[in-house]
Amino acid sequence: MQSKGPAIRKRTQIASANRIMFIWVAGISVVFGVSLVAAAFLVQMLFFNERVLQAKEQTISTLDTDNGNVKSLQDNENVLNTNEALMSAKAQPDDQAIQVILDALPSGANSLALGASLQNVLLSGISGLTLDSLQVNPVAGVESLGDNGSVSDNIATQPSSQNQITFQFSVNGDDTALQQVLVNLEKSIRTIDVTSLNIESQGETQMMTVQARAYYEPAVNLNLTNEVIK
């Protein structure tokens, strides 16, 4: 019985050593796992901070460029406001000369305004001229024609890629009157392209049918936005 004592103590010591080794291995494994997760998190944060810094640098660079262009734009505007050709074409005496450019290329389709300009300015006051018909077509996808003949903007859609307003009219008169119509279209501050012109003789007078197009340029909206970096 006494010979079994040392063997039992050895087995007990071995079992105790195994338990201690297991505890150490388990503890080291936990510490290693936590360290690995922490390292992966720190690496992700490092890359995230790098993306944030790059986005900030790009924003700062854009703002610096824009601020640097302000002085040049102001100088160009001041030069245009002293342009004699623009000053002579002002619609209102109190307008700045640069307003002529904005009137020549409006920011909206507004086909009704173009029709009024044609009827009351370009095709009006010409001796011996009679306006037979005038049609300005609403811009497809941008304007819509109501039941009462009114035209409204369709804000939900994107502007036409061509930014064109097509129209047609028919007038009759003598050669001088018809020639003056073409001169008025040419002198208009708005860019007008005549795509089709047909003249028919009607005894002592002639009838001219014109198909043409005018242009507009949608305004550019500049807004500061918040960007979420992921």
Image (cartoon, helix red, strand yellow):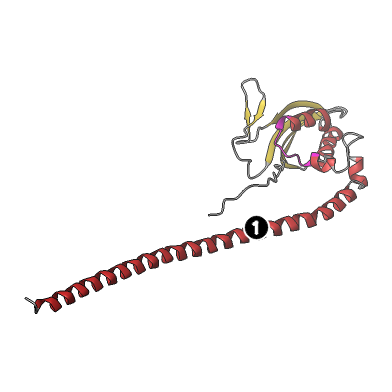
Boundaries of the magenta span: 103-112
Give the mark count. Answer: 1
- Identify the image quadrant of residue 105: top right
In this view of the protein, which residue sits in the foreground, 208 or 190? 190
- Identify the image quadrant of residue 136: top right
Rendering coords of residue 213 (x, y %): 71, 40
The residue indicated by pointer 1 is 56
Rendering coords of residue 125 (x, y %): 87, 28
Above-or-below relation of 227 to 177: below
Residue that sits furthest to the top in the current view: 148
The residue at 71%/33% (across/down) is 110
Residue 69: in magenta span:
no
The residue at 89%/49% (across/down) is 78
Residue 110: in magenta span:
yes
Screen quadrant of the N terminus: bottom left
Q: Main secondary structure of the magenta part?
A: loop
Q: Residues within 10 Å of mark 1 (few under 14, many from 20)?
A: few
Residue 30 makes an appearance in the image = yes
Q: Is residue 25 left or right of residue 155?
A: left
The residue at 86%/49% (across/down) is 77
Residue 204 makes an appearance in the image = no
- Identify the image quadrant of residue 58: bottom right
Q: Is residue 121 left or right of residue 200?
A: right
Rendering coords of residue 35 (x, y %): 43, 66
Amino acid type at circle 1 is Lys
Above-or-below relation of 185 to 69: above
In this view of the protein, which residue sits in the foreground, 192 or 42? 42
Q: Give SS at disc 1.
A: helix
Residue that sits furthest to the front in the current view: 2
Rendering coords of residue 86 (x, y %): 89, 44
In this view of the protein, which residue sits in the foreground, 56 or 176? 56
In this view of the protein, which residue sits in the foreground, 166 or 161? 161
